[in-house]
Image (tube, coloured by chain):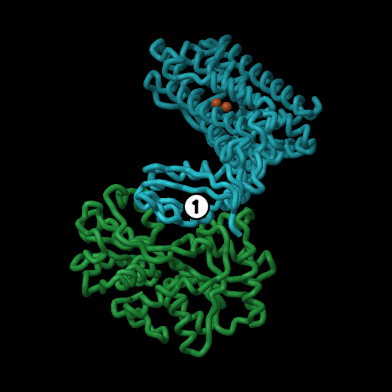
Chain colours: A green, B cyan
């Protein structure tokens, strides 16, 4: 297997994923870094295969990172967060209510219905619910959670769940809806959430999103070369710019793991995975 | 390191990023150097959150300042992505016809000639992408002429003025019209197939071919309409004529196809249409032949023009033109060529009556027509640089079907 190319795993949440990684594959190979990719239909299997060493790197949702880290730690090894997009840093989620709603404070969500995204969405579900918990409101106890499960197993990469929650809020079927800040702007712009008739009730602290996780025992030289190439991709390079546009970044930055603390807490709070990285969420069927 | 340069400020008032405020922010950032700072103020709900989202997506930095008096304040740090996007961008030639590039970049695609084209992107699959293959300096002028000369079949011809003809004369007219429709349909499809292969950088050549296709559509219409004018059934279509037209479609090379179609075929048709105009037994037939002939003269001028240009760039093209005529001749050697029905109909039109003397005169006129056609083809071949001897030999190999 000495000649085997560096193999990346990615989740096929959208057909453009093929365009993106095909393009990157050509780009890496042209720079003397033999590269290939495999696609997964959901994140859980990708994480497991990363840990088994079937792939060298996994383009990972924040939740996939949390699970990979836990599985590795339980096995007495570690995975590395090698690189991330500039757009993966310092995101927030918001909880939105109708402007004319009598809900003025987070405490007034008590007894109400909160719409969230897919059960496995960090930004649409887990992080905002943990945020409400930190403010003293337990999901499912102090308020009812209405999930909008679209693309379960994609860890919220599919926008559909958050959009459905926003629609439910507009139509009065829920009292509040959770979504990532970027989708709040998008939904407001496209009219799913009419701007003047909606109000942001609360905003989470900043957190980080996707990361390039590498497998246990990947040699440092290969990992270093892969990271160096990623970080060298320039938005001024026309051969790679369309791919960066599709993947939604201007530059790759070094990975960092501090930004996953909120999600680690949320995963524990809602028993999504256990400490060893086993799936423990009862209602989760990727 | 703290930036001590004075801060530019923009006040968005109540305008939100969901309602177009990004235009104001973009405009204010555009005049700053990369790394320059802009203080953004505003009162729109969620402005702070939306500014962070927008800045992140555009590659700008953001530093939040505490809100005061219900006003959001944030400092944006200008990123360099918009500058990087236009790194390596170039003008797609010059908008004027004199600025046409010899070999436009295939990644320019459908960009307007002269537009600033972002570097990169996919190439359009356009194989006619060299000036010498499609261009003639006459193209702008011929296109303008074509655009100004479009006529409305409904009003350009006085269809109501049709007087009934003796049955056999009418049948001859209908036979000739039936033949013409068949030829016009081929003349429509051939340029249409090449139109989508031409790099749009050669705009006037593309536009000209578009008018040519539209012209042929009208020709199909008016000949069909004349054929049906007195309610008679259409004439016959011979295998030989159809085989001849079929070989035009088999020619995948634009130069060779326009040589066979425009220079030789449509060139020959100029004589045929003049003949019909002269001997037409009625005003409608005369007028449709006249209007169509004006259009055909442009088609011949364009085909001849771009081949003349190409021959100067690539003299060996003449050998390929010669080979194309010979190849087509060989392919058609065992076919009948012009159907007897059409030939006889032309004789009847020129005869104008049924006594032996009239028929003899009609027959002579059709012979004369073929001599004229041969002369015309030779003249055009000489313009492409063939010797008179070669021109005579090659013209004689042209299809007996005329087109
Ligand atoms: Fe025509
Ligand atoms: Fe024509």
Rate crowding at label 1 as few (under 14), some (14 to 19) or many (20 or more) other CA atoms within 10 Å.
Answer: many
Whether B315 is drawn above or below B365: the answer is below
Residue B178: x %, y % from top left = 48, 27
Q: Which residue is tagged 1?
A: B75
Is the CB–ligand 2 distance for label 1 below 8 Å? no
Residue situated in front as seen by the camera: B136 or A12: A12
Label 1 marks which chain's residue? B
Residue B139: x %, y % from top left = 64, 27
Kindly state the secondary structure of the residue where label 1 is placed: strand
Image quarter in which the C terminus of chain B is found: top right
Task: Report the residue at 40% width, 46% height from top.
Answer: B42
Query: Can you name the residue that lies furthest to the left here?
Result: A111
Task: Report the residue at 59% width, 39% height from top.
Answer: B194
Whether A259 is drawn above or below B7: the answer is below
Indicate the quadrant where residue B304 lies. top right
Look at the image and tell me whether residue B127 can be seen: yes
Residue situated in front as seen by the camera: A210 or B111: A210
């Amino acid at each position: 297997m000495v000649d085997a190319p560096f193999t990346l795993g990615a989740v096929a949440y959208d057909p453009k994923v093929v365009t993106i990684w095909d393009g990157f594959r050509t780009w890496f190979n042209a720079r003397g870094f033999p590269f290939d990719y495999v696609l997964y239909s959901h994140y859980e299997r990708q994480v497991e295969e990363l840990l088994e060493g079937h792939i060298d790197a996994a383009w990972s949702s924040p939740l996939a990172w949390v699970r990979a880290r836990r599985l590795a730690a339980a096995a007495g090894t570690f995975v590395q967060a090698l690189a991330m997009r500039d757009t993966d840093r310092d995101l927030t989620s918001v909880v939105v209510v109708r402007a004319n709603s009598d809900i003025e404070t987070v405490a007034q969500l008590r007894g109400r219905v909160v719409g969230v995204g897919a059960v496995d969405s960090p930004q649409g579900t887990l992080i905002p619910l943990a945020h409400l918990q930190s403010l003293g409101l337990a999901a499912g106890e102090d308020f009812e959670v209405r999930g909008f499960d679209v693309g379960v197993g994609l860890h919220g990469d599919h926008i559909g769940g958050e959009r459905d929650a926003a629609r439910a809020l507009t139509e009065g079927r829920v009292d509040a809806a959770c979504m990532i800040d970027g989708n709040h702007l998008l939904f407001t712009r496209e009219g799913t959430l009419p701007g003047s008739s909606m109000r942001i009730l609360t905003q989470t602290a900043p957190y980080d999103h996707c990361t390039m996780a590498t497998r246990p025992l990947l040699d440092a030289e290969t990992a270093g070369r892969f990271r160096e190439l990623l970080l060298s991709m320039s938005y001024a390079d026309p051969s790679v710019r369309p791919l960066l546009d599709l993947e939604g970044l201007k530059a790759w930055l070094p990975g960092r793991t501090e930004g996953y603390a909120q999600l680690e807490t949320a995963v524990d709070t809602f028993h999504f995975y256990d400490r060893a990285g086993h799936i423990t969420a009862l209602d989760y069927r990727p | 390191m703290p930036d001590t340069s004075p801060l530019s400020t923009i006040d968005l008032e109540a305008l939100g990023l969901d309602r177009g405020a990004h235009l104001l922010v973009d405009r204010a950032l555009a005049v700053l150097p990369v790394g320059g700072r802009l203080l953004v103020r505003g009162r729109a709900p969620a402005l702070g959150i939306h500014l962070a989202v927008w800045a992140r997506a555009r590659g700008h930095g953001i530093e939040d300042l505490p809100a005061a008096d219900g006003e959001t304040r944030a400092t944006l740090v200008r990123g360099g992505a918009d500058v990087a996007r236009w790194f390596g961008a170039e003008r797609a030639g010059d908008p004027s016809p004199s600025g046409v590039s010899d070999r436009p970049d295939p990644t320019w695609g459908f960009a307007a000639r002269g537009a600033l084209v972002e570097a990169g992107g996919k190439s359009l699959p356009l194989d006619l992408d060299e000036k010498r293959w499609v261009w003639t300096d006459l193209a702008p002028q011929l296109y303008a002429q074509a655009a100004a000369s479009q006529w409305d079949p409904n009003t350009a011809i006085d269809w109501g003025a049709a007087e009934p003809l003796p049955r056999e004369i009418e049948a001859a007219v209908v036979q000739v019209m039936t033949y013409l429709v068949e030829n016009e349909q081929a003349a429509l499809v051939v340029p249409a197939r090449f139109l989508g292969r031409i790099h749009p950088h050669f705009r006037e050549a593309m536009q000209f071919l578009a008018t040519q296709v539209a012209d042929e559509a009208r020709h199909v219409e008016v000949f069909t309409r004349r054929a049906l004018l007195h309610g008679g059934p259409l004439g016959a279509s011979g295998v030989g004529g159809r085989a001849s037209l079929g070989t035009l479609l088999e020619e995948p090379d634009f130069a060779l196809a326009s040589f066979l179609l425009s220079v030789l075929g449509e060139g020959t048709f100029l004589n045929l249409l003049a003949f019909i105009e002269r001997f037409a037994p009625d005003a409608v037939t005369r007028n449709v032949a006249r209007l169509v002939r004006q259009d055909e003269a442009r088609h011949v001028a364009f085909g001849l023009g771009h081949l003349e240009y190409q021959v100067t760039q690539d003299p060996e093209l003449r050998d390929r033109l010669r080979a194309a005529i010979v190849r087509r001749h060989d392919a058609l050697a065992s076919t009948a060529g012009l159907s007897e029905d059409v030939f006889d109909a032309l004789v009847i039109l020129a005869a104008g009556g049924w006594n032996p003397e009239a028929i003899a005169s009609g027959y002579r006129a059709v012979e004369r027509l073929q001599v004229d056609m041969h002369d015309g083809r030779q003249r055009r071949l000489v313009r492409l640089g063939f010797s008179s001897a070669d021109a005579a030999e090659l013209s004689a190999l042209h299809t007996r079907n005329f087109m």
